[in-house]
Image: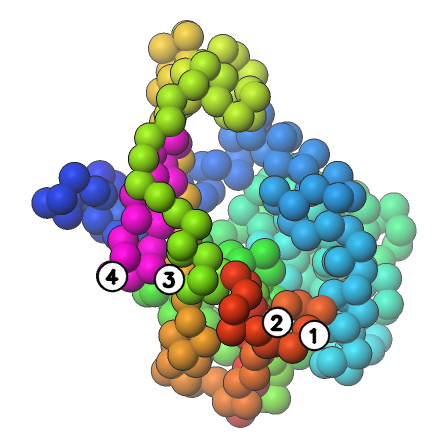
Amino acid sequence: MEPAANAGTGHGRPAPFSAYTTPKLWNDPHISSQMLALHLAADETAASRPHRFIEASTSWIAAEFGLGRASRVLDLGCGPGLYANQLASRGTQVVGIDVSARSVRHARLTAQRDALPAEFREGNYLVDELGGGYDLACLIYEDYCALSPSQRTGLMVRVRKALNQGGAVLFDVTAARRFDAFRDGSVTERNLMGGFWSDRPYIGTCETWTYPELRLALERYTIRTDAGLTRQYWNWTHCLTRDDVLKELQSVPFDEIRFFGDLAGAEYDSSATTFAATAVRS
């Protein structure tokens, strides 16, 4: 996995990818409830795309990859099933995996309520069993760029093994242009982000470090409650070029690599802050 947390670089910054706290973040009872509410808000963009975009995206995905009732889709980091259950509503068989117990529970209950052919599992897609026999694997909402290069490569190797011959992987990417929006600095506030981080009063600090040589940014949140509890969450954003992604996919290897502007099939735009990639297991 990754180096030990708090490993230094000698320049006052943590070493790149020196801690991975995503599972801890998504299973905190208070934070996970906040995140689920953001997911379910139709026009909110802090946790997922607006719901109208998700509808357009799932329509494009189904058409682009020829998904039907015999198709099997793996949704990595499925959250509360916003994409998975829409694909399943078309008859496609979907397996969703997510580290958040709360999100998985919501996705599963929705699928059961609507009698959808969708199965949801709580797990860490970096290490847990993915299953096999899939025609498509999805990794949505720029999760690819929250991972280190070694995590990304390891995941793509495992995804390739889970796909049928001719199956495809689809994901969206934080583009290199986004790096310009990050600035080194620190902010400390009472109940930072309006109480998002705890249901008890707290002091929250967000420290931002940039790594220009990598086009990498770290936002590290330290939450200190009045009750004396301290927690820390590390949010990495690796801003990638199309060539970066191409090389990573070719190394797995994948073939027939294509790029789009988004997960609804828009044309690739080199000036945009996000893009999408697809690749095929030969």
The amino acid sitting under disc 1 is Gly
Q: Earlier in the sequence, mark 3 or mark 4?
A: 3
The amino acid sitting under disc 3 is Gln
Q: Please, what secondary structure does the residue beneath circle 3 have?
A: helix
Q: Which is in the foreground here, disc 1 or disc 3?
A: 1
Number of other residues with Cα within 10 Å of mark 1, as a class: few under 14, some 14 to 19, many 20 or more: some
Q: Is residue 189 left or right of residue 261?
A: left
Q: Earlier in the sequence, mark 2 or mark 4?
A: 4
Q: Please, what secondary structure does the residue beneath circle 1 have?
A: loop
Q: Is disc 1 in contact with disc 4, using a CB cutoff of under 8 Å?
A: no
Distance from Cα at disc 2 to Cα at disc 4: 25 Å
Outermost residue, right side = 114
Q: Is disc 1 in contact with disc 2, using a CB cutoff of under 8 Å?
A: yes
User: Where in the figure is residue 274, as x and y percent of width and height?
Assistant: 54, 63
Label ID, residue 151: 3
Magenta range is 206-221
User: Where in the figure is residue 146, as x and y percent of width and height?
Assistant: 44, 54
What residue is pinned by disc 1? 265
